[in-house]
Image (cartoon, rainbow, N blue to C red):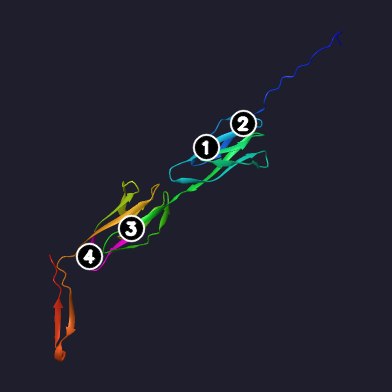
Amino acid sequence: MPAENIKLYAVYESISFTITTSVEHATVTVDGTAGYGETVSFTVTPEAGYRVTDVKATYGTSGSEFEVTEQNGTYTFTILADTTIAVETERASYSVAASGEHVTFGGLAETAGYGDTVSFTAEAQDGYTVTSVSVTDAEGNAVTVTQGEDGSWSFTMPAGNVTITAETEQLKGCGCGTVGLGAGGIGFLVLAAVSL
């Protein structure tokens, strides 16, 4: 001990923890490290055709969770240990609408998941024939649709709502008429005029 008072100084530095991610079909934007007690902010951007279903910030071998809050698309939590941000996603579903006169659509569901194969039939009413079938997305872009050997149609669901449109035309030379009985039981046939 020296013959005078001494002063002791301690230098502290923040403990830095690592942040890793566990995610499929999405991108997490976050700094890779943060100091003890800091508020960590990050964003999650799903791939086209997917939506986020759950976001967690876990630590330790038991998978304990920090409380994660979300506001306007930004997630935050307070870090106290090495952390893994885990994001769960699922394929998004979009609506399927059908439009056409004198045609009946069969086998259609109201929604379909991104990437699903959507199959359907388009059967013209009596006296009509289907001339074309097309599929467009929400922006009006054409979606490739093919016709199978059995007459059904199919396409791959894009990442957005779609509309199926069937065009029909009336069959020419259709002799449509009504048979009835006149006075005294005499039969007669009324023919409907069909423009060709």
Q: Residue at x 46, y 45 (%)?
A: 50
Q: Is residue 124 magenta?
A: yes
Q: Classify mark 1: residues with Cα within 10 Å, few (<14), some (14-19) or many (20+).
A: some
Disc on res. 15: none
* Whether label 3 touches label 4, CB < 8 Å: no
SS class of the residue under badge 4? strand
Residue 121, how many percent across, how many down? 32, 61
Which region shows up in magenta?
A: 121-130
Q: Earlier in the sequence, mark 3 or mark 1?
A: 1
The label shown at residue 98 is 3
Residue 43's disc is 1
- Give the amino acid at mark 3: Ala
Residue type at mark 1: give it: Thr
Q: Determine which residue is flagged by label 2.
A: 18
Mark 3 nearby-residue class (10 Å; few <14, some 14–19, many ≥20): some
First along the sequence among labels 2 and 1: 2
Q: Secondary structure at mark 3?
A: strand
**Label 2 – label 4 distance at C-alpha:** 68 Å
- State the quadrant of the C terminus: bottom left
Amino acid at dot 2 = Thr
Q: Nearer the viewer, mark 3 or mark 1?
A: 1
Marks 4 and 1: CB-CB under 8 Å? no
Of the image marks 2 and 3, the number of the one nearer the N terminus: 2
Q: Name the mark nearer the viewer: 2 or 1.
A: 1
Q: Main secondary structure of the magenta part?
A: strand
**What is the spatial separation of the Cα atoms under label 3 and label 4, in whole angstroms?**
18 Å
Q: Position of residue 41 (x, y in %)?
A: 56, 35
